[in-house]
Amino acid sequence: MPRSRDTVLSQVLSVAQMRAAEEDLIAAGTTVDALMQVAGRGAGEWVRRIAGGGSVTVLCGPGNNGGDGWVIAEYLREHGNAVQVVEARAPATDAARNAKALYRGAIVAADNEPSGDVFVDCLFGSGLTRALPDDLYSMLCGLALRHHHSIAIDVPSGIESDSGAALNAGLPDWSLTVALGAWKHAHFAMPACAAMGARRLVDIGVAAVPGAARVLERPRLSSPSPDAHKYRRGMLGIVGGEMPGASLLAAAAALRAGAGYVKLAADDAPANVPPELVVTGDFGRMLDDPRAAALLVGPGLGRSDQAGRLLASALYAHKPTVIDADALMLLRPAMLGSAPVVLTPHEGEMAALEQAFGLGKGGLRRDRALALAKAAGAVVVLKGPDTLIAAPGGEAVVAPRASSWLSIAGTGDVLAGTIASRLATQCQDLGQALRAAEEGLWLHAEAARLCGPAFTAGELAHAVQAAVKECLE
């Protein structure tokens, strides 16, 4: 894939953005039929790789997604696969009718209960907004059950593209989902993304779309400069609190994510402090230290009046700060200044922040995160199985689904420490805070992948070092 297309191919488009992008291609001189051939034949190659020499059944709906299916079927027939098409509805667009006319293979009725090696879903595409009718739902599920592998083209039928919501209960799981032209939000949003299997993208020439979200990518990190020392690499100050285990997990990750010096302020020195972690009881001195490049406040902080005062003091220091866990429940708009801030809420903490900042409830996760980022003037990492990042300027970054083994206590503390460590190495403005959030989130997911199944939060924190190694240029 040409490097010049990499940025464009990482964008994530809404249904409206995708339609406008296709209209721009047509206005520039291509045709709907030509785009359908490029998309269908590109998707057909991915189907062929899964099918090998096996048999394929393609389910075609009435719209242009069905037209893509006719193109896929003819491509497979040309390459020697035994292919059959189930025509769920007659083509309703000129392009779909033209694509059907070019198909030279078998057409079978769904009542015959066709079976085989690979089933391809081209029933409906990314514009679906209502549940499948009973007959088409039964047809879709029955075909998926009678084939060894199932492949969805663009977005699985029964999925709302902009939200990832399932419009029908009990939809099939997919071996592969082939996106056409650009990624859609459903490819990264729960519950849809959990059922899509592997995901691949077919490039049809769509241009960059202003304001589009983008996919989180592997960061490119560098080794410290030859003249580096601990302060030049970045000193991170961690504000401890009532539960020392959480701040120690954050510190363990921070020590391995790139910062040159990590200091923990705590009233009482926790047990089993690693020798490389500096612990002080003087909160004020640590917060005022001009060598401290960034702060982390929240893991294990507690929600007492004293915890609120520590949070306010940390933000009054006007240093780049990551705010996590309990600190998010204590945060109020008046506490924030002009220094770069990264907020890392899970869903419950997000609801509390929305209330504190006077924001509405409900809506798409990315819209909620963007609203909070704008209101707080902060980068927001909205955590969950479909974590995403939002920035005050309107940037949105969606993360591929990480290991479900992360669903244990303490992994959020590890994420906060990783992001804060990256913040300490580079942060002077919100743009760099966004970069630190992206780097930290990617390292966190990669550390989980390297850990394999059934790890502890402590093991995850130690695996951050290996994740950093994966990113060195």
Image (spheres, rainbow, N blue to C red):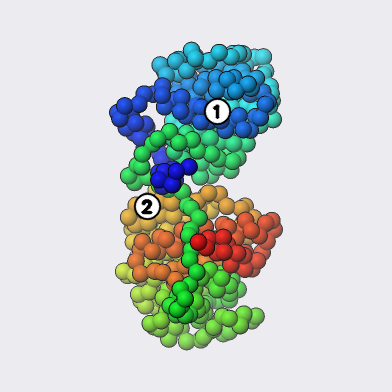
Question: In the rendered image, which quarter is residue 149 located in?
Answer: top right
> In front: 212, or 326?
212
Q: Amino acid at mark 1?
A: Gly
Q: Residue furthest left?
A: 27
Q: Amino acid at mark 2?
A: Glu
Kindly tell me whether residue 129 is visible in this rendering: no
Residue 394, horizontal then vertical, whole percent? 34, 52
Q: Residues within 10 Å of mark 2 (few under 14, many from 20)?
A: some
- Which of discs 1 and 2 lies nearer the camera? The answer is 1
Dot placed on the residue nearer the N-terminal end, 1 or 2? 1
- Marks 1/2: CA distance? 33 Å
Tell me the element at label 1.
helix
Q: Which residue is mark 2?
A: 395
The residue that appears at 50% across and 61% down in the rendered structure is 473
Residues at marks 1 and 2 touching, judged by CB atoms closer than 8 Å: no
Q: Residues within 10 Å of mark 1 (few under 14, many from 20)?
A: many
> In front: 453, or 304?
453
The residue that appears at 63% across and 33% down in the rendered structure is 50
Q: Which residue is mark 1?
A: 44
Residue 337, horizontal then vertical, whole percent? 32, 70
Residue 113, horizontal then vertical, whole percent? 67, 18
